[in-house]
Image: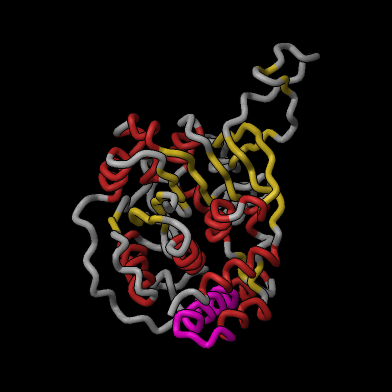
Amino acid sequence: MLRKLIIDCDPGHDDALAILLAAKYFDVLGITTVHGNQTVEKTTRNALRILEFSGMTHIPVARGSEVPLIQPLVVHPFGHGESGLDGPDLPDPVTSVDPRHGVDFLIDTLMAHEDVTLAPVGPLTNVGAALRKEPRIRAHIREISLMGGATAVGNTAPVSELNVECDPEAAHIVFTSGVPIKMVGLNLTRQAEATPERCERFRALGTRVGQIVFEIVSWYSGRVKLAYGLPGASLHDACAIAWLIDPSLIEAVTCHVGVELHGQYTRGMTVCDLRHITRPGAPIQGFGGVVVSEPANAEIGMKLDVERFFDLLVNTIAMYP
């Protein structure tokens, strides 16, 4: 029996790879969309387009939160274009969305199932709101594998990563929920660089889906090269799914992660305590005046087996007609 999974996302080029990867290895109970790379109207449209070109329209899509829990909405269109999925020439979707709000879809679906994995690869507004609205869903979540945060350097801000910075309060709710968390941050996902040679592997499949994925990744890489001079885009969101499929792809450490909510320069930072100044079972009290580590609440991905990761992506895309 396939493992049950819900994807929460803001498609987004790398979100498209995450969806295509997940659909072949999990029982995807649904996709909820959120603001982030673009407005939720556009990210919802893109989720439907991805499912339609890949022939996966049996997966329901529920439109989620338009704005963060507290702060004003900010979208980041440069990396993903005006549509949020610029590049491939994809038709307008014909599939209808689920009538429920994404938060209610999450709650209803989780309460109807046991042992469900959540894969949020956008801002955490929907997941945070669902945990706050119906705390009983915690018992139905096996784990959360999220793309967000960083151990050090950010992207949209010096030490903050986009998904967490878009809604730090929601991220705080998730990281303090008590649900087991796998965090795929920028320190890991920047290793998943889609160089031209790696992009070409998708086109070389000779399939329609392979060609579309080539166009998606190539367009995205072009924006990254324009902005940062790098040879390829990082396929951030697919890393959160790949970790679930093959845990051996990622080396990780366990530590405490806090979300900064107030700093003028650090709001949205994921503060990863990698010092490990603890004893098994409980923090040390008064250890020579050093503030000791709080109990671990997350696994943090640190090192990616890059070539095997791209082998997994290419082999998965080859499964599509």
User: Is residue 220 covered in magenta?
Assistant: yes
Residue at x-position 65% and y-position 47%: 301
Q: Position of residue 121 (x, y in %)?
A: 48, 54
On screen, residue 98 versus residue 7, left or right, reads: left
Residue sticking out furthest to the front: 1
Residue sticking out furthest to the left: 99
Q: Position of residue 98 (x, y in %)?
A: 22, 57
Residue at x-position 60% and y-position 35%: 257
The answer to whether residue 122 shows anywhere in this view is yes
On screen, residue 153 versus residue 160, left or right, reads: right
Q: Is residue 258 above or below residue 62?
A: above
User: Is residue 132 covered in magenta?
Assistant: no
Residue at x-position 28% and y-position 59%: 60
Occupied quadrant, residue 230: bottom right
Question: Total number of numbered labels?
Answer: 0
Q: Is residue 137 above or below residue 280?
A: below
Which span of residues is magenta-colored? 204-223
Q: Is residue 21 above or below residue 319?
A: above
Residue at x-position 69% and y-position 40%: 253
Which color scheme is applied?
secondary structure
Q: Position of residue 293 (x, y in %)?
A: 68, 25
* In front of the other: 223 or 242: 242
The answer to whether residue 32 shows anywhere in this view is no
* In front of the other: 87 or 16: 16
* In front of the other: 255 or 110: 110
Q: Position of residue 148 (x, y in %)?
A: 54, 49
On screen, residue 157 versus residue 216, left or right, reads: right
Magenta segment main secondary structure: helix
